[in-house]
Image: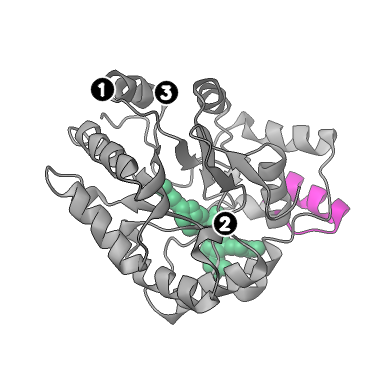
């Protein structure tokens, strides 16, 4: 396994297991630099969203890195404000314009939204058929949301991007996604902004043993479980360190100790379970 390791989506498109998150990164030099540093550090997968308001800076960071577009995997997401009838395609085209791209690798519905998700998915299917998104998927979907979507859709989502980390390992949902051929991606893999995950005593002990940081241990746990993971940082040292995951391996005992941390599941973000489609 190395930084170029990918996972095959259900339509054959390869997605790099390690990606770079950009939530709360501002639409200015901060994000331009962070994205450029990430690409320089070897990340080949960048995650943004219309709702983050930073697609322009993400696009500039990509351009400034000088990377060949085809070597990069770029994800963005449909804003809730753009889920109304006739708005979805405009929202997608605005994202392309801000990113200065003529296609994205993955386009996602950001959150299930009552009365608007099923129609929005039809627009994502059209975008996929047009070739302007190499894959389409969803975020924050539970088994119930998928059951409802499958009744009304022609194309199966390639990805479910969900809050996922050692304190919330969502094993039943992951098993369901595996059975349905849907890849899962971890958001807030490090516990998000202000979370307490990095202070976990069990993770600290494992990190000391491997002479790695807790963040590196969590991200390595993701990779060894085949979870696509998208840590965010605006600091160059952390961006580099969060990709320095390939010179150690967690043992089966380490992996079990981390898996067991979810005996008392804790969310840092919003719970999508009660949201109707
Ligand atoms: N689909 C969705 O609904 C959804 C929801 C949330 C997030 N996401 C995506 O998932 C990405 C990751 O989630 P996230 O941003 O919520 O949280 P995260 O990646 O778990 O954590 C980011 C936080 O941890 C800090 N950090 C990063 N590396 C660190 C390190 N090595 N040591 C200590 N602190 C570190 C960052 O601070 P600094 O930046 O100051 O370094 C930031 O405060 C997002 O950026 C976004 O792209 C998607």
Residue at x 62%, y 47% (from the top left corner):
17
Label for residue 231? 2
Occupied quadrant, residue 172: top right
What residue range appears in magenta?
Answer: 200-214
Label for residue 152? 1
- The 10 Å Cα crowd at callout 1, few under 14, some 14 to 19, many 20 or more, is few
Q: Secondary structure at mark 1?
A: helix
Image spot of residue 80 (x, y percent): 24, 48
Marks 1,2: beta carbons within 8 A: no
In front: mark 3 or mark 1? 1
- The 10 Å Cα crowd at callout 2, few under 14, some 14 to 19, many 20 or more, is many
Label 3 beta carbon within 8 A of ligand 1? no
Count the marks: 3
- State the quadrant of the C terminus: top left
Q: Secondary structure at mark 2?
A: loop
Label for residue 143? 3
Residue at x 49%, y 42% (from the top left corner):
163
Mark found first going from the N terminus, 3 or 2? 3
Q: Secondary structure at mark 3?
A: helix
Label 2 beta carbon within 8 A of ligand 1? yes
- The 10 Å Cα crowd at callout 3, few under 14, some 14 to 19, many 20 or more, is some
Q: On the rendered structure, is 164 left or right of 31?
A: right
Q: Name above or below for residue 181 compared with residue 25.
A: above
* Residue 204 forms part of the magenta stretch: yes
Image spot of residue 155 (x, y percent): 35, 29
Mark found first going from the N terminus, 1 or 2? 1
Q: Name above or below for residue 37 compared with residue 144.
A: below
Q: CA distance from mark 1 to mark 2?
A: 33 Å
């Amino acid at each position: 396994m190395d930084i170029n390791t990918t996972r095959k989506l259900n339509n054959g498109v390869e997605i790099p297991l390690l990606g770079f998150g950009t939530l709360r990164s501002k639409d200015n030099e901060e994000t331009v630099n962070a994205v450029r540093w990430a690409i320089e550090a070897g990340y080949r997968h960048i995650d943004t969203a219309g709702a983050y308001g930073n697609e322009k800076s993400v696009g500039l960071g990509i351009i400034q890195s000088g990377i060949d577009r085809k070597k990069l995997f770029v994800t963005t997401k449909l804003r809730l404000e753009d889920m109304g009838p006739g708005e979805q395609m405009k929202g997608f085209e605005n994202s392309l314009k801000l990113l200065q791209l003529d296609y994205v690798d993955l386009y996602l519905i950001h959150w299930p939204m009552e009365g608007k998700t099923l129609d929005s998915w039809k627009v994502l299917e059209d975008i996929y058929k047009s070739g302007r998104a190499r894959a389409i998927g969803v975020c924050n979907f539970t088994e119930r949301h998928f059951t409802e979507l499958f009744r009304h859709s022609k194309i199966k989502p390639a990805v479910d991007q969900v809050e996922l980390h050692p304190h919330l390992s969502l094993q039943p949902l992951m098993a369901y996604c595996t059975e349905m051929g849907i890849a899962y991606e971890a958001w807030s893999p490090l516990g998000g902004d202000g979370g307490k995950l990095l202070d976990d005593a069990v993770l600290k002990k494992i990190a000391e043993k491997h002479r790695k940081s807790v963040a590196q241990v969590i991200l390595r746990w993701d990779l060894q479980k085949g979870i696509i993971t998208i840590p965010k940082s605006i600091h160059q040292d952390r961006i580099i360190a969060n990709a320095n995951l390939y010179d150690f391996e967690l043992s089966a005992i380490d992996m079990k100790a981390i898996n067991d941390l979810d005996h008392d599941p804790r969310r840092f973000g919003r719970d999508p379970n009660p949201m109707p489609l």
